[in-house]
Amino acid sequence: MIGQRYHHSTFNSPEVSTEGGQDVAPASESKKRSSKKPYGRSRARNTRVQAWSIDQFHVEPQEGKTRFHDLDLPDELMHGIADLGFEYCSPIQAQALPFTLDGQDVVGKAQTGTGKTAAFLLGIIDDLLCNPLEEERYAGEARALILAPTRELVLQIAEDAKLLCKYTGLQVHTLVGGMDYQKQQDKVAARLVDILVATPGRLLDFVSNDVVHLDQVEVLVIDEADRMLDMGFIPQVKRIVRATPAKSHRQTLFFSATFTYDVLMLAEQWTDKAVTVEIQPESVATDTVTQHIYLVSTEEKFALLYNLLQQEDVESLMVFANRRDECRRLHQMLLDHSLEAGLLSGEIAQNKRVRTLDKFKKGELKVLVATDVAGRGIHIDGISHVVNFTLPEEPEDYVHRIGRTGRAGNHGTSISFACEDDALRLEPIQKLLGMELKCEQPPEALLAEIPQVEYKSVRRSNSGGGNNNRRRRSNGGNRRRS
């Protein structure tokens, strides 16, 4: 069925689809959308949204806040927003959406937890609805492409897209490693590809096999660009970008948590007259996260963690360490103490990582040990505590770590263990946050003696490779199956 031509109406019937997706304006002489709304928008409203009206979704105007009502979004999209209970834009959404909705390129600096996913999804969905394609399309021909560095982030973005597109009839597809290739190919061949969310390695497999075609991409989103760089994916991303239309004939949305020199050079190469939007880290999670810095010795750290897990208010906990060998050792020590713990790192096979995440979400695991690369982009509501077993080497990673808790209106607690080796890392973190982090002695209860057990030796995972201390090698030797 590869390369088979289908008529658009065969797949996008007027019936409501629960396989929603995101995409943008049709590929034309210019990537910028016309100021005139085509008839397809009103037609979509009449055929798909008969039982719901925007009047059913009332949100009072508030000074200094942008309502989604203020953005003139299609009713089908507003219906999905109403179902999710979204009323006001986050800062990154309020700043970026006016430009993305206007078809302009955007380079955004924002951490996870700021709402940046919706900042690019809403623009894509709006443009796709306003500019429907009436001509025939090929199977595997993507209109919008979103690249993300990890499978977990791809699946999270796709899930958000489907919820927002619930009433639009748009189709969302995912391509990731660690899942059955043939099943993914069958899905691509069976339904039109409005929005494609993928990791670089698996996408290149599909492009090389002539299953997916990128020459008609209208909107390209590159998410977590700095993490792409850290994980060594940039050569793959460059090949993917070259397979899409020229930057003057597509809209490019480029997001990164940090603006290093290399990241800015990539943004300049891949965007066209982009607008830069920056959200400072002090606006991220700090209002809903109580932060503690406990001064402890290296030898006291595990006892502190063990006793913390015995506290009644600790419902679920993520603990971060800087190196994979530290995470392996810490995970094994928790298991030796009969604690239900999971491990996420770049050397763990994708299917095992997904099973571990599912168990953590269901409450079957109370604690999840993770490296920064593996933990980035994980969106799980209800994580009560985050522990920095070692303070991160990069200050931006601190913000990402504590952003795993205090989500969806809940309150969270971040606890960092600071020994002599960690002391020098505190100052850059405080400078980035623009606030002082008070160092304190841990409560005596958390330093109580713990049961003595015989610790088992930790064996290295067979799926990894390279030097444990090199973050750039954190995905092991299997680069293409990201």
Image: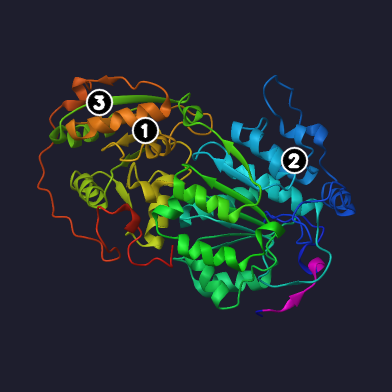
- Measured as percent of width and height from the top left, residue 67 is found at 71, 30
Which residue sits at x=13%, y=55%? 457
Which residue sits at x=43%, y=68%? 480
Q: Is residue 4 magenta?
A: yes
Q: Give the CA separation, mark 1 to mark 2.
A: 33 Å
Question: Which residue carries the number 1 mark?
Answer: 385
Question: Which residue carries the number 2 mark?
Answer: 78
Per the image, label 2 sits on a secondary structure element best described as helix
Mark earlier in primary sequence (2, 3): 2
Per the image, label 3 sits on a secondary structure element best described as strand
Residue 204 against residue 425 in the figure, above or below = below
Mark earlier in primary sequence (1, 2): 2
Residue type (three-letter) at the residue carrying disc 2: Met
Q: Mark on residue 294?
A: 3
Residue type (three-letter) at the residue carrying disc 1: His
Residue 183 against residue 270 in the figure, above or below = below
Residues marked 2 and 3 touching at CB (< 8 Å): no
- Image quarter of residue 320: top left
Q: Give the CA separation, mark 2 to mark 3.
A: 45 Å
Q: Is residue 43 left or right of residue 380?
A: right
Mark earlier in primary sequence (3, 1): 3
* Number of numbered tags placed on the structure image: 3
Circle 3 packing at 10 Å, graded few (<14), some (14-19), many (20+), is some
Give the extent of the magenta segment.
3-9
